[in-house]
Image (cartoon, helix red, strand yellow):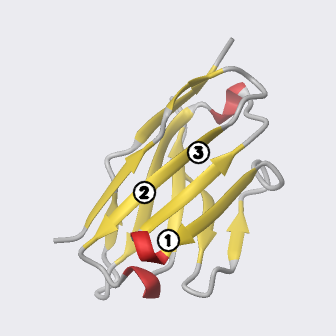
Amino acid sequence: QVQLVESGGGLVQPGGSLRLSCAASGIIFSLNAMDWYRQAPGKERELVAHITSERRTQYADSVRGRFTISRDNAKNTVYLQMISLKPEDTAVYYCHTKGRSGMDYWGKGTLVTVSS
């Protein structure tokens, strides 16, 4: 029922930009807080950005000032605009939300590779 589908990943050079999208279904999107996580090779999954239903945002220290999370409730979509990308941003990026039961829902991820 709940489905999160990420898109927008790809290969980008250091200093470049990319915008990720996550299309959600099966939830009352406008009421759900949404998250972007990432998992780099050999590392644990980490929270990158968070946005509440009121559009209040939080960011990991490593991305603050470079990444912007936003949402378009009319499109049931959350975005992650990434600028000034660094090689250490290379990871699989996952969209996440919590269901009404508190269950975690995850997208399948989209790969971002920052390399020259």
Residue at left offset 50%, top offset 64%: 78
Q: Please provide percent x and percent y for residue 74.
A: 43, 76
Q: SS of the residue at dot 2? A: strand
Q: For the C terminus, which image quadrant?
A: top right
Which residue extends farthest left? Answer: 1
**Residue 43 vertical position relative to residue 97 in the rendered view, above or below:** above
Chain-order first, disc 1 or disc 2:
2
Residue assigned mark 1: 34
Residue type at the position of mark 1: Met
Chain-order first, disc 1 or disc 3:
3
The Cα–Cα distance between marks 2 and 3, rounded to whole angstroms, is 10 Å
Residue assigned mark 3: 19
Quadrant of the rendered image containing residue 64: bottom right
Residue at left offset 79%, top offset 36%: 84
Residue assigned mark 2: 22
Mark 2–mark 3 CB contact (< 8 Å): no
- In the visual, does 99 lie left or right of 97? left
Residue at left offset 64%, top offset 80%: 55
Residue type at the position of mark 3: Arg
Mark 1–mark 2 CB contact (< 8 Å): yes
Residue type at the position of mark 2: Cys
- In the visual, does 30 lie left or right of 16? left
The Cα–Cα distance between marks 1 and 3, rounded to whole angstroms, is 16 Å
Q: Please provide percent x and percent y for residue 15.
A: 78, 28
